[in-house]
Amino acid sequence: MPNFFYEVHFYLFGLLAIASSIAFVTRKSPVSAALWLVSTMFCLAALYVMLEAHFIGVIQVLVYAGAIMVVFLFVVMLLNLGEASAIADTRGKWGRLAAGLLGLALLAQVMALTGKRLPEPFTPGGGYDSVAVRDQGAVGSVAQPLFNEYLLAFELTSILLLVAIVGAVVIGRRRQADAR
Amino acid sequence: MLAESLALSAVLFTIGAIGVLTRRNAIIIFMCVELMLNAVNLSFVAFASALDDVAGQTVVFFVLVVAAAEVVVGLGIIVSILRRRPGATADDVSLLRG
């Protein structure tokens, strides 16, 4: 199933994602960094769709690129951090060198771990995944394990969201009390 | 496409980790953490596709919910810190007291 057209676009979006994330890490201004991160997330959404995770691709665009990044940009605007100032500083030369070495070590470790034991004979598509998608649709096939095997985790997620809402409200109210 | 996806996931995770280590701006550190979560999501989706099991996509859903909750609380904390001390970086708030 992965033909030439598929592979070319897979590598294209992968390289775009890497380039956008490098640009995101190196930008001084928080606004341009956030916009490069949005670009990375769009490339990842395209990769999700190519890996037959259509629902996750849509959710990636809606929630990550749409909601979470808008919250980040809203906070940058609220705190007036738009221009590159002292707050956008990176660390000194030695800090950057140490981080680069650590990153290389991490990358080598992950590559060595994943490069050895890949289940290579598997081919994407044509199995439980595509059968479930054809029978139940892209959303139903994801929802099936969500409400059967992962039901407890799903319910705990609602508690987590409730705690986050209460925490955000408490932090916000204390901030207003300080301003007075 | 599994090997390529995992390599891309490792590269993105490493870039995010380098960003966390090199930047001082708390908001950018948060965005780097989001990038690392995205890299992990990519490996989940790649394994779900390669192993023909939709449960990997379900786990991505949970990661997404946790990321959203983390962003809400973390940005609330950052806003309340920066309202009190404008221009504070992540190094300036290393003490566990106001």
Image (cartoon, coloured by chain):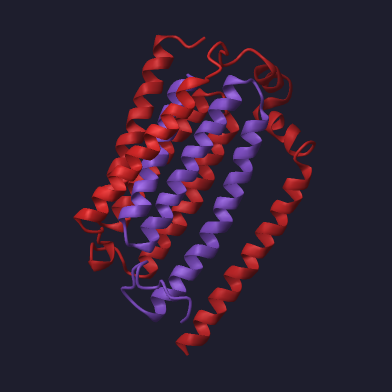
Chain colours: A red, B purple
Instruction: From the viewer's perspective, tell me whether residue A165 is left or right of residue A76.
Output: right
Q: How many marks?
A: 0
Determine whether A172 is above or below A73 in the image.
Answer: below
Query: Please, which residue is most extreme toward the left here?
Result: A93
Whether residue A21 is visible here, answered yes or no, is yes
In the rendered structure, the answer to whether residue A82 lies left or right of residue A169 reads: left
Task: Name the residue: 64% across, 38% down.
Answer: B59
Is residue B18 depicted above or below A57 in this figure?
below
- Residue drawn at (55%, 74%) of the image: A171
* Location of residue A161 in the rendering, given as x and y in whole percent from the top left corner: 66, 58
The image shows residue A172, relative to residue A32, as above or below, that is below
Q: Is residue A50 left or right of residue A14?
A: right
Return the x and y of residue B42 as percentages of the image width and height: 50, 33
Estimate the x, y position of residue A79 in percent, counting from the top left. Answer: 36, 70
Question: Is A5 on the left or on the right of A98, as rendered?
Answer: right
Quadrant of residue B91 in the image? bottom left
Say if residue B11 shows up in the picture. no
Closer-to-camera residue (A12/A156): A156
Seen at 34% across and 42% down, the residue is A103
Compare residues A134 and A152 and report the one nearer the observer: A152
